[in-house]
Image (cartoon, rainbow, N blue to C red):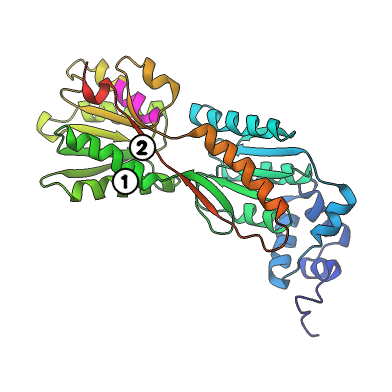
Amino acid sequence: MTEPTARQVGIKDVAARAGVSVGTVSNVLNHPGAVSQERRRAVESAIRELGYVPNHAARQLKVGLSTMLGLVIVEACNPYYGTIGLGAEQAAARAGLGLFSASSEQNAEREADYLHRFEQQRARGILLAPVGIELQTAREVADRGTPVVLLDADDPHFCRVGVDDYVGGRLAAQHLIDLGRRRIAVVGEPSRHPQVVRRHYGALAAAEERPRVRIDFLSTRDMTILEGRRIGELLAARPRTERPDALFATNDLLAIGLLQALTMARTFRIPEDIAIIGYDDIDFCTNAVVALSSVAQPAPRIGATGVELVEEELEETVGHEHRRVLLPPTLMARASTLGE
């Protein structure tokens, strides 16, 4: 039996390859949440192997284009993502659209489930702040016709919007170096947060331009206030000669935890003994026990640009090219680095 070519492949071929009914294939394409994970994976594998391309234009003509957008963020407890959501919601409202939000809570399976649910509800498009760099489910959803726009992530398969993290890391380190700090520790979780790696590289680049500046990296389990406290307690237990004189926390939650732990230790003066700078510039920075310096990201603009990119992709049904929008970060210097 000859293998069907990409032009010949139909839904029956996919069903035969996957060992399921035609109805199951149709459900995977149109109502993925109604199909078991095992069968869905079998069908998706068959689609990739055979190169099957559904007729999305015909589907949209039949059901019409939704006025609902989906947003999947990484964690609901982080105010940064809430501000992104606010920007997206306001932009959607201006366009006469609605926005429904969900949080993966750092769980890749939960993220995939929400992507399928939004697809099943025929969302107009999905804004995704992904967990890690594995984007297979997002690619499959996009390939089936639902635009997916990445927030704070970079993959050429998608339109994406974020801040130049390399520049942001450089800004943070340069600020500390200009204040005379020479032993700087970058704090963050790199394996699931590529932006942490880019911020670290930016800090290293700033240090290379100045003699006798040392940049260390303290790897964390996650990016929470509790984890910042844990790292802060470990630093407080070190001999004074082995402590950094500045901390660059790669998000504000870590920075807040570090600040809390070091001030509670009562043996540190912030910033005289250790300067601290965060990243994101959430509202709490100005209300911390010591006002927290941070690298600001234009979070509302990120959300609004994500909505614009979805609409752009829907309008350019022929010849659309995915593009990346990089927004500039801004240094916000406060008492945690400058002093009172």
In front: 259, or 81? 81
Residue 124 at what x, y percent from top left? 74, 44
Eyeballing the image, is 201 above or below 254?
below
Q: How many marks?
A: 2
In the shown orientation, is residue 161 left or right of residue 255? Answer: right
The outermost residue toward the bottom is 1
Is residue 58 covered in magenta?
A: no
For disc 1, the marked residue is: 200
| Amino acid type of the residue that numbered disc 2 sits on in the rendered structure | Thr
Quarter of the view holding residue 234: top left
Is residue 254 covered in magenta?
A: yes
Q: Residue at x 16, y 24 (%)?
A: 273
In the shown orientation, is residue 76 left or right of residue 59? Answer: left
Residue 230 at what x, y percent from top left? 32, 28
Which numbered dot is residue 250? Answer: 2
In the shown orientation, is residue 140 left or right of residue 276? Answer: right
Q: Residue at x 63, y 56 (%)?
A: 139
Q: Main secondary structure of the magenta part?
A: helix
Q: Residue at x 16, y 38 (%)?
A: 183
Assess whether mark 2 and mark 1 are in contact (beta carbons under 8 angstroms). Answer: yes
Crowding near pointer 1: few (<14 within 10 Å), some, many (20+)? many
Crowding near pointer 2: few (<14 within 10 Å), some, many (20+)? many
Q: Residue at x 40, y 26 (%)?
A: 225
Q: Which residues are magenta?
A: 252-259
Label 2: state its secondary structure.
loop
| Amino acid type of the residue that numbered disc 1 sits on in the rendered structure | His
Q: Quadrant of the N terminus?
A: bottom right
Q: Looking at the image, tell me whether mark 1 or mark 2 is earlier in sequence order.
A: 1
In the shown orientation, is residue 326 left or right of residue 27? Answer: left
Quarter of the view holding residue 111: top right
